[in-house]
Amino acid sequence: MPEQLRIWTGLAGAMLAAAGIVLVLFFVLAMPFGVARAQWAWLGPVNDWLSVLAAGPWIVATLLLAQRARMTGAWWIFTGAVVIGIVAMTIVTVLMLAGRATLAVQYVAAVPTIALAILWAVFATRLAVGRAFVPPWIAVLAVVLATAFVIAFVLIGASSALPQGPGRTALWLVGGAVGLVVYVGYPALWLCIASTAR
């Protein structure tokens, strides 16, 4: 079990990290300061396909971590909700790539799923620390990521309530930057679990 957990959490972390890095490159190269650059637009679909390919390892890693943490009852219901969210987000992403769904619909599927997955990670890593198969700082990292997600959500939400202007732009940029840190940091959490699980 420990070896399987390390393999699948490492694979999930690596693939999610690749998707996250491509997304950062997309915003830096294809949409710098909100100005579209067509020559880098291909990074968007690459990010989406990497996210789709990462779904399988992500689901397996989630289930293996839940099993290794010896979750019971409501914890498995929580885990099932995360898995359903990942599946739904993946289906919507494939539909978007096929031109059958919009980016707005993908956001509706992705944001709650990511929020749920990060919240689940907070509790799962705490259980994992209690079972003594990962070090305590793993659980701390999960809490930091969850806190950063809330900050990003609040800042971006607050920016939409402001009139057009520098204040709105500043809030959106700061919130977006924190959100990108979370998007890249979440895969790092899986990689840290892979490198420390025993």
Image (cartoon, helix red, strand yellow):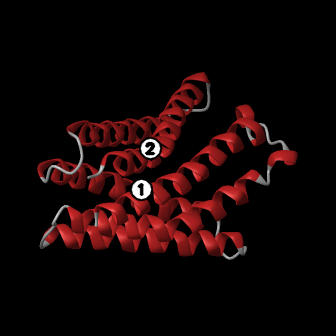
Q: Residue at x 36, y 66 (%)?
A: 4
Disc assigned to residue 114: 1
Q: Residue at x 50, y 67 (%)?
A: 55
- Image height check: is 37 above or below 46? above
* Percent position of residue 186, x then y: 43, 47
* Percent position of residue 99, x then y: 72, 73
Name the element at disc 2: helix
Say left or right for 52 vs 26: left
- Image height check: is 198 above or below 34? below
Pointer 2 residue:
188
Pair 2/1: label in front: 2
Quarter that holds the N terminus: bottom left
Viewer-nearest residue: 50 or 48: 50
Q: CA distance from mark 2 to mark 1?
A: 14 Å
* Percent position of residue 66, x then y: 25, 65
Q: Report which quarter residue 167 is drawn in.
A: top right
Type of amino acid at the residue the image marks with label 1:
Ile
Residue 192 visible in this rendered orientation of the protein: yes
Say left or right for 7 vs 94: left
Viewer-nearest residue: 186 or 175: 186
- Image height check: is 122 above or below 173? below
First in sequence, mark 2 or 1: give its number: 1
Type of amino acid at the residue the image marks with label 2:
Ala
Residue 105 visible in this rendered orientation of the protein: no
Name the element at disc 1: helix
